Image (cartoon, rainbow, N blue to C red):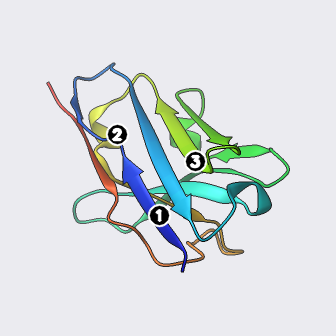
């Protein structure tokens, strides 16, 4: 059974930083494209970033230069370093393997809440 457990979300002031973590079980992160999505209140879930199994990274334009996706193959973990956060980044963040349509490949975890507010 494939499961994802996200952590690291918090309340942070604009301009601050957070590092999100994703523990994957039932799937090996180095064998699939892994990604982060977010869902803001009243909006659909949005693709944010991915790291392909070969190591190439991709980002949505709104986070380029501010967010960095990475993985630890030994720990089977996925990370999202978020810098220079702004209120528009407020959302629940989720990790998953990336399907061909940039949706999630397996069932979603509970996510982790990121709130950017002064």
Instruction: State which mark lies toward you, 2 or 3.
Output: 3
Q: SS at mark 2?
A: loop
Provide residue 40's location: percent of width, then percent of height. 29, 56
Asked if residue 23 lies left or right of residue 113, the reply is right
Q: Residue at x 80, y 44 (%)?
A: 56
Q: Which mark is residue 94?
A: none
- Whether 14 is drawn above or below 89: the answer is above
Residue that protrudes farthest toward the front in the picture: 74
Q: Earlier in the sequence, mark 1 or mark 3?
A: 1
Disc 1: CA contacts within 10 A as few (<14), some (14-19) or many (>=20): many
Numbered label tally: 3
Disc 3: CA contacts within 10 A as few (<14), some (14-19) or many (>=20): many
Q: SS at mark 1?
A: strand
Provide residue 66's location: percent of width, then percent of height. 52, 27
Q: Which mark is residue 8?
A: 2
Q: Residue at x 58, y 42 (%)?
A: 61
- Whether 84 is drawn above or below 8: the answer is above
Residue under numbered circle 3: 77
Say which of 89 and 2 sits in front.
Answer: 2
Provide residue 41's location: percent of width, then percent of height. 22, 60
């Amino acid at each position: 059974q494939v499961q994802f457990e996200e952590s690291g979300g918090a309340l942070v002031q604009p301009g601050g930083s957070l590092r999100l973590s994703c523990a994957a079980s039932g799937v090996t992160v180095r064998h699939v494209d892994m990604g982060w999505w977010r869902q803001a209140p009243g909006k659909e879930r949005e693709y944010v970033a991915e790291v392909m199994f070969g190591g190439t990274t991709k980002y949505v334009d709104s986070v380029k230069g501010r967010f960095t996706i990475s993985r630890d193959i030994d720990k089977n973990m996925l990370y999202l370093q978020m810098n220079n956060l702004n209120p528009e980044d407020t959302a629940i963040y989720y990790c998953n393997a990336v399907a061909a349509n940039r949706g999630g490949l397996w069932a979603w975890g509970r996510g982790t809440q990121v709130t950017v507010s002064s």
